[in-house]
Amino acid sequence: MNMQFSGNQALIVGGSCELALSLSRCMIQTDLYPILTYRNDKGLKTISDRLHDCEGKYRTAYLNFNDCDSLHALFDQVIQDMDYLIDFVQGDFESLIASADDNHIYDYFAENVGFRALLIKKAARLMLTQKKGRFVFISSSSAVRANPGQGFYAAAKSAGEALYRNLGIELGSRGITTVTLRPGYVDEGRGKKYLEAQGRKAIEKVPIKRPLTAKELSEVILFYLSDSAIGFNATEINLDGGLTAEK
């Protein structure tokens, strides 16, 4: 399929993670222009190292989900126009609910739900001036099938899904649409570490008996950004090899 895109600039939130970097390469090869956010010097160096051969074909921007000033600066000083937003950000919080630290609970949801809502609002208002835009939220199969200790993570992902779903409902008639993808096991980043710890036990639960590759996920995201996917809006799509389809 020769995919067509009605936009060019894509803000990739959480741009230093492995999946975001894989997507960025696919975008650059498709003549899209990614803007990757980072939250610290380590993240900036990771982006620079991984995309060292793509100079001039992308840019970076500071954004810390624990710093509202960074959000205002991003939209006041860096982003003047934006056609797509791809949201990879999610903080780690593995804890049994009954034993979690009170302050950690509050801070986690402020960062992963409250800040995200502010980000979506600002991005949507910018897209409204252009009368078009597309959001893709990278959720997780954990939103519908969480393991013990993933309650806070699953709740934050579910809240993010609700925000993006309603945005697509509210602004679809004005050219702004949203899609949520729920990846299962992926052979990069957090998923790779989990699979290494669990061995074949985790993969045996997946009907296709293997994790997705970062390249496969990146190509799916590109499709949902393309003009061919305009009919998908305000919806969640499982991308987990059938993991959540079984009992």
Image: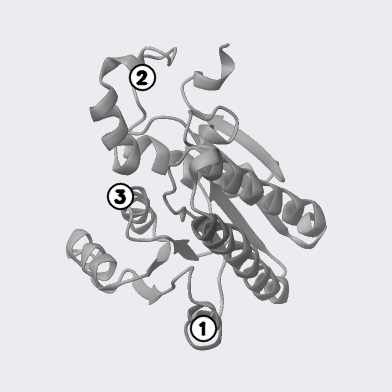
Give residue 69's mark: 1
Residue type at mark 3: give it: Glu
Disc 2 designates what residue? 202
Residue in the picture at 60% in, 34% down: 237
Against 219, residue 160 (above or below) is below
Q: Which residue is drawn at 34% across and 59% down?
A: 28
Q: Residue 78: x and y, percent? A: 47, 83
Label 2 element class:
helix
Dot 1 amino acid type: Asp
What is the x, y in percent for residue 50?
A: 20, 59
In this figure, which residue is indicated by the disc labeled 3?
Answer: 18
- Residue 139 visible to the viewer: no
Q: Which residue is drawn at 41% across and 64% down?
A: 34
Color encoding of the figure? one colour
Q: How many labels does the image show?
A: 3
User: Mark 2 is on which residue type?
Assistant: Ala
User: Is 244 or 176 nearer to us in this picture?
Assistant: 244
- Residue 134: image quadrant is bottom right
- In this orientation, does residue 210 appear? yes
